Image (cartoon, rainbow, N blue to C red):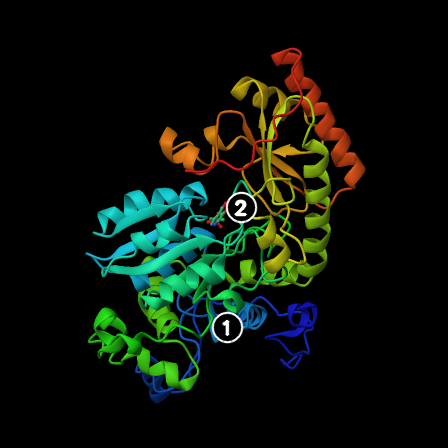
Amino acid sequence: MSTAAIHAGWRADDMHGALTPPVYASTAYAHEDHASLKDLFARRSSGYAYSRSGNPTTAVLEQRMAALEGGTGAIAVASGQAATTIALCALLAPGSHVVASQLLYGGTTEFLGDTLADLGVTCTVVDPWDLGAWERAITPATRAVLVESIANPGAQLVDLPAISALAHARDVPVVVDATLAGPALHRPGEHGADVVVHSATKHLCGHGTTLGGVIVDTGSFDPRRCPDRWPRLTTPNARFGVTFADEYDRGGSGLLAYARSKYVTDFGAALPAASAQQILVGIETLDLRMRKISADAAALAGRLHGSEGVVRVDHPTIPGRPDAHLAERDFPRGTGGVFSIDLAGSEEAAAAFCDALELFTLAVNIGDARSLVCHPATTTHCHLSETQRRACGVGPGTVRLSIGLEDLEDLSADLERGLAAARAVTGPLAGADPVVAVRG
Ligand SMILES: Cc1ncc(COP(=O)(O)O)c(C=O)c1O
């Protein structure tokens, strides 16, 4: 993993021997003659024509992410939201159905319930820890199952091998949003996922500088197994003149080629070359960063658990968490740097806590080098209904923490400062109620 993070996709053999992949800041690419550009557009050759459909710097990121995830290929797009949108649009069609975990980033929940509904796709949301619910929710119209491997904001883990087995038994591909884990902690393809999406904005970039997203094909989804389910992949495409699923035999991916040709191009969701380069630099230290933030997050979660005024800590290491065995089995390198706490005294206490912090910055991002804090109910999850928020484990007193690379003791002291401020608005409180993650 550490070696691929530095080397995959790039050798210093360009004309100047650049060690780090250069930024190809070019919109279009010159071609020697008419035949060369004609062949490219007719898909008889490969290369670059226009950066909305492909760029050499972005291609390095794509190859590196495919290597890190052990996939057959990857496409980089403008944001994590674009990655989820495009991956699902490539699998779903009007009249089809998706089954999704209820523990998802708020923007994904909004996309599923609003924009996908506009496109004629229905969605059933299930408790990811209830395997029977997954089984019952899959119908003949289901074309994708969607989960986060570590859920935002409560760091809940899913039994991916079990969910994948249920979905695959019904020939439904599994899409995993692996943003909070990143390939340093967990490679979903090794646990049954067919498609992996990332918000590269978070840990992959790692320094809060750049928006980006990645879609990886792990190589296990072959639409030709049930050709009638995926006619857009398994029959000749009138617009592009190819049958995308045929690419499967050439070691590529019908799904990614389709997604890039159609959706990245039509939605215009290309990743700028400069962004790809920032993300590539970030990935070089991904392994080191993920180890430190995972260890520090677990230590801080342990200290917060039982603190006066904290009614719940949502982290897999907290006693009683039903996913503790999954942490041990599937996440031996840690469960990342994002988790949430619930404060007694509701939003008023959460506001006092956030405002008193000096080191944690109040900002709606995660996976930065800096530690960040936010109040999901009024920000990332504010467009959801009360019921949807509860299902995501987000209440009025919930605060999300994203642990950065600062010194553990400084972070701990800052959280103590926040708790003191929260207690000042709620008055004296009993000890913590060791409530575990919200269910249902
Ligand atoms: C788990 C998860 N997936 C997807 C996204 C969307 O990513 P982006 O902001 O890069 O569009 C986020 C953003 O917070 C996220 O937390």
Q: Residue at x 23, y 57 (%)?
A: 96
Q: Is residue 310 above or below residue 439?
A: above
Instruction: Please report the residue visible at 30 percent of the width from the left and 48 percent of the height from the top.
Output: 124
Q: Residue at x 72, y 46 (%)?
A: 405
Q: Earlier in the sequence, mark 2 or mark 1?
A: 1
The residue lying toward the viewer, choosing from 34 and 369, is 369
Task: Give the left or right position of residue 421, taking residue 100 as reference.
Answer: right
Q: Secondary structure at mark 2?
A: loop
Query: Is residue 24 in view from this perspective?
Result: no
**Image quadrant occupied by the N terminus:** bottom right
The residue closer to the viewer here, 181 or 169, is: 169
Ligand 1: does it lie within 8 Å of the C-beta at label 2? no
Point out residue 346 in the picture as x, y percentages from the top left corner: 53, 20
The answer to whether any part of residue 148 appears in the image is: yes
Q: Quadrant of the C terminus?
A: top left
x, y percent for residue 315: 61, 41
Q: Nearer the viewer, residue 91 or 50?
A: 91
Residue pointed to by mark 1:
71
Q: Nearer the viewer, mark 2 or mark 1?
A: 2
- Which picture quadrant has residue 307? top right
Residue 179 in the image: state x and y as whole percent.
Answer: 53, 53
Where does the image place residue 359, in percent across and percent down from the top left? 71, 33
- Which residue matches tag 2? 156
For the point 58% across and 42% down, the residue is: 321
Instruction: Give the crowd class for mark 2: few <14, some 14-19, many >=20 residues within 10 Å.
Output: many
Cα distance between the residues tagged 2 and 1 = 25 Å
* Badge 1 residue CB within 8 Å of ligand 1: no
